[in-house]
Image (tube, helix red, strand yellow):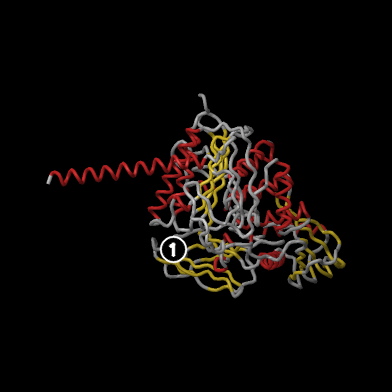
Amino acid sequence: MHSCWRGRIRARAALVIGANLVAFGLLAWLLARGGETRAGGQESAATPERVQLSPFGERGRGAATAPAEDTDSAPTTEPTPAPASPATRTRDRTVERRVATAAANAAARARKLSKGKVHAGNTTVAVHVREPGAPEDLVAIHSSRAMRPASNLKLITTATALVLLGPDWTFATAFEARGEVVDGTLRGELIARAGGDPLYDADGDGGVSEWVAALRRELTRAGIERIQGALVLDEGSFPAPAPGPEWPSEKEYWKEYAALSGGFSANAGCITANVDAGDVGGPARVRVRPRAHGLKRRGEVETGKKGSQLKLAVEARRHGLTVRGRVPAGTRGYATRFAHPDPVELFGHAVVAELVRQGVPVSGGFRRERGAPSGESIGRVTAPLERAVVPILRDSNNSVADQLFLAVGHAVAAKGDRDGGRAATARALEELGVPSRGLVQVDGSGLSRANRVTARQMTALLDAVLARGGERARVFRDALPESGSTGTLSARMRKGPARGRVRAKTGFIGGTSGLSGIVQTLDGRTLVFSILVEYPRYGGLNTSVWKPLQDEICTILVESRKSGT
């Protein structure tokens, strides 16, 4: 009996010791591989292989890979390897070891929660940390590996606009009159030239009344009170609205995060439904903005008992706009947003209807015409860049980011398409001194799975923008979410030393999670950092594993002290 128990105890002790040895070996291997140093102190370049390499392990070489929409494989067009970094390194090994330990623990949690489907062998965690203006790395774990950035790409999109165009730049939609103005009537057409304005107010109700009021003032100055013809929408060099390469599937196109972009838009390509409860059993009040959208309205919303579950189904397709369901009694000001199938059509319907509502009849409605003949200039309706930067960085609005990507291409390269946006980004990175090798950008939002960037490029970008100082740096920094306080970080790091000390851009698409930004340490230093994670798609891990890992790393950085102190 006793010998049996002693045998069990010895077996259990052997298992514990073995598990500890495995964990220790995993951490030691991570530090050896994750430090990315070669002989001579240089960091290994990103590997353009289709088989994903991981800081924890390596997938079996030669494993079959499916298209990127279905798996987490590399893009069809392989990115150019990122350049090797300088040989001189002053690493904080204590901080780096703590970060590596946190990553190893997170991989273990992912393995448990996914029942072995996500683990250290098929997960990549890249981390880069530096002090602004300093050449040394504080932490470098696979920081030169090209990875999907998700919404961290919005940092590049907004930085490009601020650097090349400046914080005072405005979106501009120009208007021309083609025809005579007689007794207040334009006997012809009003032409609108596209400028890529998302026509979005993050604090508004989704309507266009303020923007159209500005247009109404320009028309009044020109003596126009009625338009006998049509509003002509010239999309110019902007492409017809369409999904980006390797975007989500078509069944998701109605969702807000997949809203399309184009030369014209309204409410960032979305419909906003505002709902107030009525009497129990009766209809709820539903206000749709913009008021006019060109789609047949379907569905009703009922008022349920107080405390009942809120259930709303919303959708906008070419066959109609649906808002139906039930809200509990007492509901006030509930708002939900969903994508319109065509932002240009939404703009046309919304603007014509609002002009009529504000006393300017438009007899011919609207139509789309590329290369419309010029007319007499009437004026421009503008919107400040900062109004777009805030929802892009603070709220992670995809459509506004994609609109800005196209608009900057139009303003800088005279091409309002993806090629123009990429050309503008390349120019901005060159001006900032940020290496662009390995960068793949196909949209402004990061929604595409084809985008690629390195953690090292992200910190270099943050460093360079902040170093510029002035209004560019202020607008950029102030728009970033603050830990425990604003935007997409309002519910994260609400307690502990990291609260209020992190300003960073979040990011998530299936199988990808990221956080890049600025940390204020307890000893008064500023650090810039980037954390990028790739893993096989498995629901719930971003919330349960990778966000907590990022928050833990931020806390480690906040608590870190300068070497030698």
Comparing 119 with 298, the one in front is 119
How many numbered marks have been drawn onto this rendered protein structure?
Answer: 1
Give the residue at x 39% y 62%: 306
Answer above or below: position of 520 versus 323: above
**Quick one: 31 or 424, which is closer to the camera?**
31
Task: Identify the residue at image location x=40%, y=49%.
Answer: 109
Which structural element holds mark 1?
loop
Determine which quarter of the picture holds residue 231: bottom right
Label 1 Cα crowd, 10 Å radius (few <14 / some 14-19 / many 20+): few
Residue 470 appears left or right of 297: right
Residue 215 position, x and y percent, is 75, 59
Q: Relative to 376, say whether 500 is above or below.
A: above
Q: Mark 1 points at which residue?
A: 310
x and y percent of residue 536 in the render?
A: 48, 57
Return the x and y of residue 19 as percentages of the image width and height. 34, 44
Q: Tell whether 441 sits left or right of 482.
A: right
- Most extreme residue toward the top is 565
The residue positioned farthest toward the left in the image shown:
1
Task: Name the residue type under label 1.
Answer: Leu
Residue closest to the eye, 39 or 171: 39
In the displayed structure, would residue 172 be above or below residue 346? Answer: above
Identify which residue, 422 or 189, lies in the foreground. Answer: 422
Residue 210: % across, % down: 68, 56
